[in-house]
Image (cartoon, coloured by chain):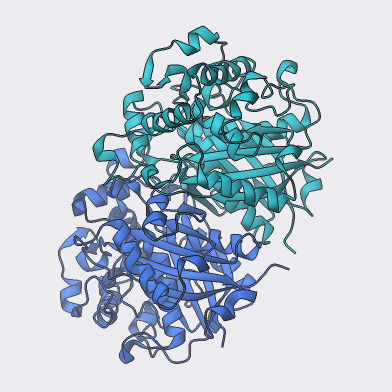
Chain colours: A cyan, B blue
Amino acid sequence: MTRRVAVVAGGHAKFGKRYDATMRELCAEAYKPIYDEGITQDKIDASVLSYAASQFTGQGAGSALIADYLGLADKPHLRVESACTTGTASLRAAWGMVASGLYDVMLVLGVEQMNRVSSARATELMAQAGDMRWEYPFGISFPAFYALMASRYMHEYNLPHEVLSMIAVKSHHYGAQNPKAHLPREVSLEEANNAVPICRPLNLYDCSLITDGAAAVVIAAEDRVKEFTDEPMWIKGIGAGASEMMIQDRSSLTSIPGAKRAAKAAYKMAGLEPKDIDMAEVHDCFTIAELIAYEDLGFAEPGKGREIVENKENYHDGRIPVNVDGGLKSKGHPLGATGVSMTYEILNQMRGTAQNPSRQIDDVQYGLAHNVGQSGQFVNIFIFERGW
Amino acid sequence: MTRRVAVVAGGHAKFGKRYDATMRELCAEAYKPIYDEGITQDKIDASVLSYAASQFTGQGAGSALIADYLGLADKPHLRVESACTTGTASLRAAWGMVASGLYDVMLVLGVEQMNRVSSARATELMAQAGDMRWEYPFGISFPAFYALMASRYMHEYNLPHEVLSMIAVKSHHYGAQNPKAHLPREVSLEEANNAVPICRPLNLYDCSLITDGAAAVVIAAEDRVKEFTDEPMWIKGIGAGASEMMIQDRSSLTSIPGAKRAAKAAYKMAGLEPKDIDMAEVHDCFTIAELIAYEDLGFAEPGKGREIVENKENYHDGRIPVNVDGGLKSKGHPLGATGVSMTYEILNQMRGTAQNPSRQIDDVQYGLAHNVGQSGQFVNIFIFERGW
């Protein structure tokens, strides 16, 4: 029997264009609230300190730098990289090292500093996660991958663009209430639906942000949890999946095969079904991705995700609240931090510390984080359980 | 109780300047012998597919690309990055995921394709693993970090450079007998000692190679091992350590603090002492690093490592054979592949399949891999046990 593992604390830097902070300083900002709760460096056995791409800052092998700056240079550390799932891949690797008994207490921290280059250059660097021989040279970037999916979805299910815009409106509604959000302001449906095109059919408000930020959690083995908190969040289910490298190799563009596999594995490990989930953090790198996530996670039948949107079931008081922290769209998407930020948000929702009563979900027993990399080549899904 | 985990198979690409192969093709070359032994894709639950630096090829998030090319795109994968310890950090993360029960069978593959850029540019890119704000801008690169250590060691212990050259002679003696080696030729002591300076006191033959290559192993949980082999190599001890980011913050330059911590942890987990080890693969990125490793691993007292060299105790028929595959010096050092290549070599030595009788060590029961990143900021040490 493997040991149970819980998330016992979390911290979160302000997301945004953080010209005021270096990468290491963003990490310290995420770790500080954890330190202030008493989880000082001496209590941490090892750490996973991750970011998705060295190219934004030029810094290679940065976990050594971060460990040093956080006062953890005498403890083992490593970096995990899995594109936009770097945060949850880090949590998965750390979970294994704790569940297996190698370490008892680990810090898992994700960071990305994307705005040291221009937005255009950042988009180009992200495109280099596509195949550098068979995709990137032909000019395809991530808005284009998701525009292909959106086009196909809109064609197959006769979906009007307005439904996608409604997702953006919801994200901004909640981001406006999240003090950590990059773009904390409301947008109207009209504004969202008529914004400047980025890659048709996706417009400005269909796309997530290029954000600097960091988030951190501490995980502990079951026999150590009580030292840190009376409100642990247990890691109940883990599912990981992957998909074909090139989307033209996939049999469908209206779902992500790796996400369906990951969801199946996570639900199985947790012994739960979609209907048991009280809230979800999903990877809305583009609005279409959030719609597809509803279906891949089993919250809606294929082609029926729009009902969740149109009925506002995804709001904080709805059937399945999704991204009521603003999501990647309004809170922002610092690649390596995103999966850890999702975990942090679920911890806070369970604890009733979501900062703002108008986005606090009642009585969260089970929360799900759905984190997708590239155009579905990486997927990690975590199911968390309230432990008190 | 955590499950025991064994290495059950290995594969190794030819190391060298591999202009003939893309990164994904190097990976396939390393996986092919494993596939040919019958460990086909359907038997693998998940994989860790790693390289140290995206900058050499420009390819980001490459585990998706590699997984796809190897026919593993429908299974979870991730990349671990820990500078030159990327290979063993991958093994450590994978061990956790298998020991904990998340997966039963995992492929661990390390690769690096360094020669798509010039040697000078490769050296510069590696220097970006130094602190990009406080080290790299001042021009220090890895030969310089190790030259500082060598200078201090030579000063404190009155070491003549010739002892370092004797290590290079030994590495090339064995590399010449290894068909996978990058530079498989003997060098004389005179040639090694009088070579062109790179960064004084280190000369050309004190420095490891800029190499393209890949290596792979499969690990399996104890209850699954028999499906794959009658000659499993158990993972008996794992120790990881880290050191201060900047070497001026260290109290000594004649040892690597993280390596001593990692060795202590690995020996403790294995229940073994240095004298129990029958062979070692150590991280000789520079000859001085091999000498320091003897001491950090407890094979010699501080300042006495030279006795191992002068008495040829590090030869295949000596007291503690070290790097009888040629090491990073002659076999080569494709960063992400190195730690996996060490593991592969120990597996072959245990099995008596070291390709050449004049470098086959008799009766290896315990083998140790010592893998160091940057100038000691990352260290992983594995102790393996013959399981038959």
Check the image and name the residue furthest to the right: A388
Q: Position of residue B206 (x, y in %)?
A: 26, 67
Q: Is residue B149 found left or right of B1 in the rendered image?
A: left
Quadrant (top left, top right, bottom left, bottom right) of the N terminus of chain A = bottom right
Would you place residue B304 above or below residue A264 in this image? below
Q: Position of residue A8 (x, y in %)?
A: 73, 42
Q: Position of residue A234 (x, y in %)?
A: 74, 45
Q: Is residue A72 visible?
A: no
Nearer to the camera, A64 or B344: B344
Q: Residue at x 50, y 38 (%)?
A: A336
Would you place residue B300 above or below residue B153 in this image? below
Q: Residue at x 31, y 34 (%)?
A: A140
Q: Residue at x 31, y 91 (%)?
A: B358
Residue A314, image quadrant: top right
Would you place residue B365 above or below residue A140 in this image? below
Q: Is residue A21 visible?
A: yes
Q: Is residue A205 found left or right of B21 in the rendered image?
A: right
Residue A14, image quadrant: top right
Q: Residue at x 43, y 31 (%)?
A: A152
Q: Position of residue A249 (x, y in %)?
A: 38, 47
Labels in figure, total: 0
Q: Is residue A39 found left or right of A201 in the rendered image?
A: right
Quadrant (top left, top right, bottom left, bottom right) of the C terminus of chain A = top right
Nearer to the camera, B5 or A375: A375
